[in-house]
Amino acid sequence: MNLSKREFMQVLGAGTMAGMGMGTYAEADAATAAHGLYDIPKFGNVSFLHMTDCHAQLKPIYFREPNVNLGIGSMKGNLPHLVGEHLLKVAKVRPGTAEAHALTYLDFEKAAKRYGKVGGFAHLATLVKRMKASRPGALLLDGGDTWQGSATSLWTNAQDMVDACKLLGVDVMTGHWEFTYGMDRVKEIVEKDFAGKIDFVAQNVKTNDFGDPVFKPYVIREINGVPCAIIGQAFPYTPIANPRYMVADWAFGIQDENMQAMVNEARGKGAQVVVVISHNGMDVDLKMASRVSGIDAIMGGHTHDGMPVASIVSNKGGKTIVTNAGSNSKFLGVLDFEVKDKKVADFRYKLLPVFSNMLPADKEMDALINKIRSPYESKLGEVLGVTEGTLYRRGNFNGTGDQLLLDALLDVQGADIAFSPGFRWGTSLLPGQALTREWLMDMTATTYSYATVSQMSGATIKTVLEDVCDNLFNPDPYYQQGGDMVRVGGLSYSCNPLESMGKRIYDMRLNGKLIEADKSYKVAGWAPVAEEARSAGNKQVWDVVETWLKARGGKISPRKLNMPKVDGVLPNPGYAKL
């Protein structure tokens, strides 16, 4: 795609206008606000709709955006590493509006009560139909992390989400957590349920033995007579971030050279538009966009960054648009292209928040969701306690939801220290809400959620923290594997993200005393990636936490966050201290 500087500034301005008018609707009723949010003018002749990282959330939820999303080095002060007012300023969105609530953590409790829940497939379906009606031929792309993250998805072996996505009208998708159901189940869904309906694409997944493609690398679809290629980029570090045994026969990786070859091949077959549906994470997408030419847009996922404006990356072939559509079916990205003379001439981009009280539930989808949930409603709805504080997960270092899990692991397992993975999926609860089994499963539902207890030396504990920290803060995005810092209970520490590997973590203390390198400590955790864990006879983490919740007498007091002392990088527009 080739745009002059003047054209680029015009396009960028147009792409942010959705937020500028929201002040008009800030005090309006839901119907009027919906009119302002969702009546966006059609543009061009080719359109893509984008959802990603819904994590199997079929019903509307609350979801608090992070107040910590640190960018370091060249990423400091740049998207996606902006939070709160800094993000609103770049997006030109007025504080206090519905859109400001969707994008940030600001005044979360007050705004959540005012604007209601977000997401829900029945409400998303209404918005998808609305956008497809105004944009004939538009394709719905799913960036993955769709089949995992809820109790019903786990209990139905992902069938609930497969059926919901077919009804939603997903056209093309790629994956990540999908692979944690195992190779056989993924292939079964792709070859049977999706056959003739949804294309599963991933140019970077190949067999270990001969390097053959496991899935189609791309598809070419015509939109209003324009041939468009959609290339898949699955999460490149699946065998590292998740148990390798679940994808034992498959190799992943970023594979820039093959991506370039696929772009060239698709162009050679007549594609006038090339879009990558990616699960790299946004920093990786930005680097890939600078290295691979001929891609018009990368519509990304994995890092759950709801980006209200598109980033434009230059490369030797021109420019590439990079977007990310958040998580939990909370947003729908809309990317419109004007294609002239067999190439992209212009574009418009909008990120639409899905407010369940501004969009009526689609009746057909609502009926399917009720059917899916019906056998499990009593189990899902069982009240395990009432939270007196807000519970949330997102943020680079910790969240109150994970703190609850850590507190439970420490108490029930009798451990000195507890670790909880830096997962970014999980829903939020407001003070006074019932803490149900459904919420607990929203925070813990994986196919390998075993609770563990082990003895670790102080040196090993430091190594674990250093390894995860390097994964999060390595200055080269291609060495970042997504997710946030492992959450830590019982142990305090300091962190300097700007230091090199092995030097970022220091001043580790337990009960005020320095951790000794050669001393052994009892450490609780969950979701181990080692294969032997599945046959060790350990309880599932939700059973451990449920035991703790039921012993609280019905009330769960506000959690006190165990946050590390962060050195060397503050102040930072990606860090807001509460």
Image: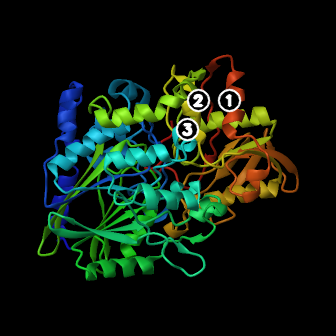
Residue drawn at (30%, 38%) of the image: 99
Where is mark 3, residue-wise? 151
Q: Earlier in the sequence, mark 2 or mark 1?
A: 2
Q: Is residue 173 left or right of residue 316?
A: right
Above/below status of 444 relative to 554: below
Which sits in the foreground, 165 or 309?
A: 165
Measured Cα–Cα span from mark 3 to mark 2: 9 Å
Indicate which disc, 3 or 1, sits on the residue closer to the N terminus: 3
Q: Residue at (56%, 75%) from the top-left corner?
A: 207
Residue drawn at x 39%, y 42% as measured from the top left = 84
Q: Which residue is mark 1?
A: 546
* Viewer-nearest residue: 553 or 503: 553
Mark-to-mark CA distance, 2 and 1: 8 Å
Residue topped by disc 2: 437
Q: Which residue of the protein is positioned furthest toward the left in this rendering?
A: 341
Residue contact at pointers 3 and 2, CB within 8 angstroms: yes
Proximity of marks 2 and 1: CB atoms separated by less than 8 Å: yes
